Image: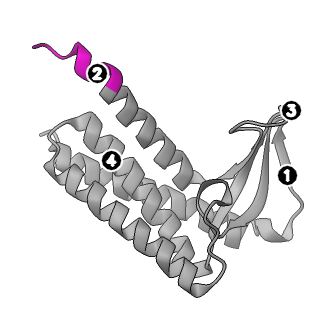
Amino acid sequence: MALSPRALGLLVAAGAFAVDQASKYWFLHVYELGAREPLRLTPFLDLVLAWNPGVSYSLFRAEGPLGRIALMGVAALGVLALAVWLWRSHDRLSTVSLGLIIGGALGNALDRLNYGAVADFLHFHTPFPAGPFANYVFNAADVAIVAGVVLLLYETLFARQQAPA
């Protein structure tokens, strides 16, 4: 028996959250990335611990407790809105996309709650002096969020056009 789209979305959210938290636990507490020098994996990808007190690219930095509470409140409202959307959706691609975003958002929110900032550890860098990927540090939750957004954009721009009338 196949999962309903709703159940699939919730399962994907739980999976994205679990992968994010497991990877952060391993890098922080087993490998102890914070006590090590950056580790070069490829010419463009390193392992390095960076604490992000804001959102993507450290925008809207929330250094104090009031700022963290505000960021967590915005995240909670966003997750609630996405959860309602997921609950109402009957499309599998939409629910998978929303599940990825929800799971990633919850993973980063738990970091803010536990540590006061989000633990990032994958450092992607290019020789380009500027641009979105010239110097970007991220984690598994960020990968899930970006993948979910890309899938939603794909569905909006292409998948629905291919559906029979």
Q: Is residue 10 left or right of residue 27?
A: left
Identify the disc placed on residue 159: 2
Q: Mark 4 packing: few (<14 Cα in 10 Å), some, or many (20+)?
A: many
Mark 1 to mark 3: distance in Å? 18 Å
* Label 2–label 4 contact, CB within 8 A: no
How far is disc 1 from disc 2 in space, using C-alphas? 40 Å
The C terminus: image quadrant: top left
Amino acid type, callout 2: Ala
Say which mark, if any, is on residue 39. 1
Q: From what the image shows, is residue 93 above or below residue 24?
A: above
Q: CA distance from mark 3 to mark 4?
A: 33 Å
Which quarter of the figure has residue 121?
bottom right
Choose top left, top right, bottom left or bottom right for residue 45. Answer: top right
- Crowding near the residue tagged with mark 3, few <14, some 14–19, many ≥20 C-alpha atoms within 10 Å: few
Residue tagged by mark 4? Answer: 98
Image point (50%, 71%), residue name: 71
Q: Residue at x 55, y 74 (%)?
A: 112
Q: Are marks 3 and 4 in contact (CB under 8 Å)?
A: no
Q: Which residues make up the magenta segment? A: 157-165
Q: How is the image coloured?
A: one colour
The residue shown at (32%, 28%) is 155
